[in-house]
Amino acid sequence: MNDTPDDPRDPKLSRLYRKASQGEPPPALDAAILAAARTAAAPQQPPRPWWRRLQAPFALAASVVLAVVLTLSMDRNPPLDGEIPATPSGKERPPATDQVAPASRNAAEALAPAAPAAGIPAGKETPRPKATPERQTPATSSQDSPHPAAPTAVPGSPGASTAKVAPAPAADAESTDMLGSERRKPLAEPALEAKREAAAALPQKSPEAWLEEIRSLRRQGRPEEAERSLREFRTAYPDFRLPEDLR
Amino acid sequence: MHDDLSDERLMLAYRDGDTAAFEALYARYRSRLYRHLAHQCGDVRLAEEFYQDIWLKVINARADYEPLAKFSTWLYRIAHHRLIDHYRQHARNVVDLFDGGIDSDELPAADSANPARQFERSDLASRLTRALEELPAPQREAFLLAEEGGLSLEEIAAATATGRETVKSRLRYAVGKLRHSLQDLL
């Protein structure tokens, strides 16, 4: 205590002080402090770096920006005919070879078991539309068609190359297509609207009849008229897959 | 297990997650620090508040603790700063005493002229408490750091951020006044 010669402490006073000094912290205060000490010493997760903490918000923002950019891009630059994947949704799913109007599709489904691919005459060429339901135009809705899931790709027919599928259960094909179309739907929607409007403004004419007219013009040696009519046809039915002889 | 370790080793062990080391350290200083504060501020509730604040500062500073000085010096330095903060808010004139702007030896104690309180303190502890209260705050602090904290003059100087000679002077005045007040008990 009195560690140096010039230390002014008085041993007698120190003894008196120790004898008289009293006071203890209350037990509740002890408990609170010890609890705080234990809590502070408990192992804690190391703080994540800032870029890890902001990972989720950044990912979300990037997704939103990507979706907006893609939507705008599709809106301003509609894809060409060949770019739209042939994956119709479950509701508006067209048949493998023919266009099916939503209204007539139910009836076609009812006939499906009786309309296998083998039942279709090989020589009957049925123009194959793009199978994307969003791209169907009102003008195509009046056509008959076999069941969507019925294997309609006839070897040698124009649609055979793309619809060369084995007979599959309708439910399987439909569920797969539903998934695909649900994903693609938001992207193709703006272009679809524009094409629908364009098609609605044109005179209604059966695509098959029109194509037959074009063939007829060609056979009659009127290629300019046939070409013009074909251009009009493509304008009216941009999604209609042309038979190979007219491509 | 922890009894043989120095204060600094205990604090380092607590820094590394050993809560038992903190409990041992706390047991060593709980009474001393509490009495130091109780005598220094003269108010039990205030002393308890300061006491908790000081220990929480120790706990929160554990991650950066390095034994650059004795643990007791560090602990009482925290206590000194806490008291100074209190004085700055509630008793500006006391801060001036610590700063040396006023001749502290000439100042009367706050409660020395209170007859009611003098009457209450008839036993030894009360006499001691009253005698301590009559001291100016810097002198009282120097005495308490020496007696309760067991600090040397150099350590008191480090804890209170003053010079050794200043501490020595304050302590000499404090001892002289206390001896005078308690001479019949010595």
Image (cartoon, rainbow, N blue to C red):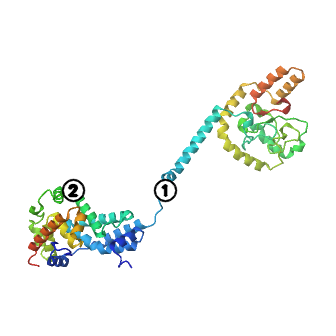
User: On residue A48, which mark appears?
Assistant: 1
Q: Residue at point 70% right, 47% down?
A: A179
Residue B123: quadrant of the picture: bottom left
Q: Position of residue B118 (x, y in %)?
A: 10, 70
Q: Position of residue B42 (x, y in %)?
A: 19, 66
Q: Nearer the viewer, residue A25 or A138?
A: A25
| Amino acid type shown at disc 1 | Arg
Q: Nearer the viewer, residue A238 or B20?
A: B20
| Amino acid type shown at disc 2 | Arg
Vertical order, B180 against B166 (above or below): below
Q: Does residue B134 appear left or right of residue B14 in this picture? A: left
User: On residue B88, which mark appears?
Assistant: 2
Q: Position of residue A228 (x, y in %)?
A: 79, 22
Q: Does residue B11 appear left or right of residue A103 in this picture? A: left
Vertical order, B151 against A241 (above or below): below
Mark 2 belongs to chain: B
As measured in the structure, the alpha-carbon distance from the residue carrying label 1 to the one carrying label 2 is 39 Å
Q: Nearer the viewer, residue B44 or A168?
A: B44
Q: Residues within 10 Å of mark 1 (few under 14, many from 20)?
A: few
